[in-house]
Image (cartoon, rainbow, N blue to C red):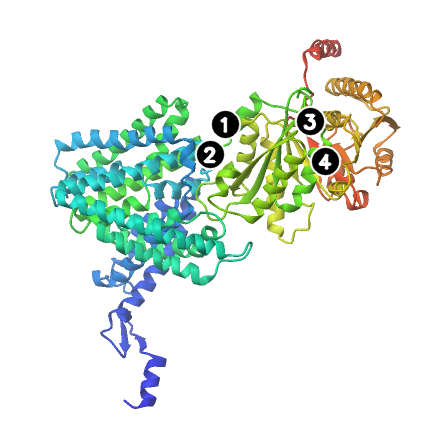
Amino acid sequence: MSSLGKIRHHLIGPVICANVTGQYAFIGSVDDPFRRNYPVFMRQFICITFAYLTIRLILRPLRQPRFVCSILAGIAVNAIIRGDYKYFVTIPKEELMLARTVGALGTTYLLFLTSVKADITAIHRTMRSASIIGSSSVLMPFVMTALVAHKLTLPGMKTPAAQPMFIIGLSLTRFPNVVHAFNELNMTTSDLGQLAVSCSVVSEAIVWLFMFLGAYVIKPSFLLYTVLTSAAFLLLIFGIVRPVIMLIIEKVPERKPVSEIYISSILVVALVMAALTDMIGSINFGVMMLGLVIPNGPPLGATLSEKIELVTLEILMPMFYVVIGFNIDVSLVDWKVSREILLIVLMNTLLKIVGALVAALCCKLRLQHSVLLGLMLGIKGPYDVYLLNRWLVQDIDRKAYTVTVLSQVAITAVLTPLIDVFYNPHRRLSESVRKSRRSMQTHPSNVELRILCCIHSEDDVPGIISLLEASNPTGASPICAYAVHLNELVGRATPFIVPYNRQMRRTPSKISFHIMRALDNYSTNSNHLVKVKPYMAIAAYKTMHEYICRLAQDELVPLIVLPFHGSQEMSNATKAVALRNLAEKIQAYAPCTIGTLVDTGMHHRTNKSTTFSCRVGVIFVGGSDDREALALAFRMVGRPNVRVTVVHIIVQDVGKDIDEIMQEKIDNGLIEVFRAKADADPCSTYRQVVVEDSEQAMGEIQGLKNKFSLVLVGQKRGTGTVFPEETMLNWSDNPELGVIGDLVASSDFRGETTSVLVMHHHGDPKVPFRDPSMERERDYLLRRSVC
């Protein structure tokens, strides 16, 4: 061949021609297996993607998970390909080799991805319960099923060791399956979901125990080989790989992306680790350990997740389900012969649920949660099928394989909707909120005040510190600030909230370090009148409110302070919307009062050369939210260099119902208490303003412009129709702040020196605060109104 001909051959390649029968002919290397198999592979990929999307759309009302839809899509595609369609010719096994290779690569990277997202420290909180429940959910079904299977001869078992291995595989709860399913159900943030994940980790530990035990049973000398090679591999992981990974993380600049070279190298190393541990007998061990030693979350864990998750789930894994569907042949199954396998699978699942139920009850879980936990641990997933797929060649035949896979799909198709329907992760939170609500009004003045401060960025810290300083911490009533740095979940499977000192050692963050150092310095400079307890929360914005509300509930916090999403310039509109939704969910589920801080200039009042000074104004119209603002102002009275002014706006000639009359009585009682306290403090003043309508009230509020460095105001009113919020909020830029809150938080009112704290009571603003002294009078008014 001439030089020009060689160039043409390499650049253009073979020309593919198709005849009318759908067969492909290659001009060039006709016998090249890749060129013969590639068109089949492309047809498989197109068909499995289209089938999955169609089945997912059809089964969406039934709340079926990705695993069930993918298996059904694989079965449907291979049924079509095996049919008498001229376009889809029968696929020889050798032409399935490319799909097998891609599918195996997909399962390997899916396990690596799941391990990177895993949070081992989440087990510590529930270690005792997870150990008991996880062990019971594995050992009980294994022992009972083995006793029953001992008297049966399971069809399709090719070797004597196949039957016990088959029962062990059914009894295990695989960690990747649980995490994969819970991500779809959005349950990893719930207490019960985290307990189930911890139980699955215990089950994974039992896997390795069975592996060593099996090596000893096969040949005692294998046990020494397995132990030594496993120890050598762990030494490689923790002695060489992990230090290199930590060095890579240290070299990544803050808020900068990880280099593509590092990402590509780690993905290649994952395959190398899988190949090394495949020599031991477990290809999963190397990939899992490599994923676990990578610090999850940003920068490295988050980047790995972003890079490989979409490719793994949407491109590589579909080919795995093509292979599964190819190995399943319903026409070969004789249900009369295979009923023993079906019986074993169903009995094993029921025993797993019962084992988890009994152990959970022993750990003092509620009966409903115990049953749901058993259902969660009974979920099957891709790694159960992956294990069966590896056994198919030597240990079990195709009939047993088909019955087992179909039964596991049926079990998951039943359990997943049941869990999704009957378990509400917000139920525990909402029930606890109703039982233990707290507010600034009911908080005693002679005990420690606990405030939960949410922090998004370093810009939120000065305003938080100034608010804490203005809240008048004293020896008799110090302040304990729970400072929670909120980080968006990017590269984790298990969201968490932990004290910062523990998390600092695992995922170092310069931003968190600067925030916590500033708060710690303030605590030291306040002579420890303000005690700071730093926390770090990593979760998705849509579920972050659960962690914040539970921390407030567990620590009996009466006030949560949120930075307003519009306080700083935000170029990311998506993040601004997410923060707004987060604030709304916190207000809906919080067990205490919420204060939204619109910070612009209050922190400019303090510096190292001057003492703290602040002019606080309270706009009081009436209602539970305004009373919360006034209750916080109570604490500020008496603080040196802090002047507190309450502007009480009274609206004449407004018709009120019984509840509004009671609200007014409570308002007047609280005002009298403040006036008595303000008379003893020359820096505190009280002023009444009488108005006739909302327009005149708004004018009076506008007159307060530039007179205060901090304005306290309630979110909603309880004074009849003088502030028709349903109508006025339609014209507001930030309706979540309320009518008056939106007015004083506007740039025209605040300018560059005024900050605003908008208070929201945890209950319905229409429901007045009840105290025993008012109940008899309210009952009397109700009887009188009936007459």
Front label number (3 vs 2): 2
What's the CA distance linking mark 2 and mark 4? 31 Å
Front label number (4 vs 1): 4
Mark 1 or 2, nearer chain start: 2
Mark 4 or 3, nearer chain start: 4
Give the SS element for disc 4.
Answer: strand
Q: Quadrant of the N terminus?
A: bottom left
Q: Amino acid at mark 4?
A: Leu
Identify the disc placed on residue 586.
none
Assess disc 3: are there few (<14), some (14-19) or many (≥20) residues with their C-alpha within 10 Å of its C-alpha: some
Identify the disc placed on residue 757.
4
The residue that mark 2 highlights is 190
Mark 1 or 3, nearer chain start: 1
Front label number (4 vs 3): 4
Give the SS element for disc 3.
Answer: loop
Give the SS element for disc 2.
Answer: loop
Q: Amino acid at mark 3?
A: Pro
What's the CA distance linking mark 3 and mark 2? 29 Å
> Which image quadrant is residue 745 in?
top right
What's the CA distance linking mark 4 and mark 3? 17 Å
Mark 2 or 4, nearer chain start: 2
Placement of 364 over or under 333, stated as above or below: above
Q: Nearer the viewer, residue 340 or 532?
A: 532
Identify the disc placed on residue 765.
3
- Residue 77 in sight from this viewpoint: no
What's the CA distance linking mark 1 and mark 3? 23 Å
Q: Position of residue 18 (x, y in %)?
A: 30, 74
Front label number (2 vs 4): 4
Q: Quadrant of the C terminus?
A: top right
Q: Dots 1 and 2: beta carbons under 8 Å?
A: yes
What's the CA distance linking mark 1 and mark 2? 9 Å
Identify the disc placed on residue 428.
1
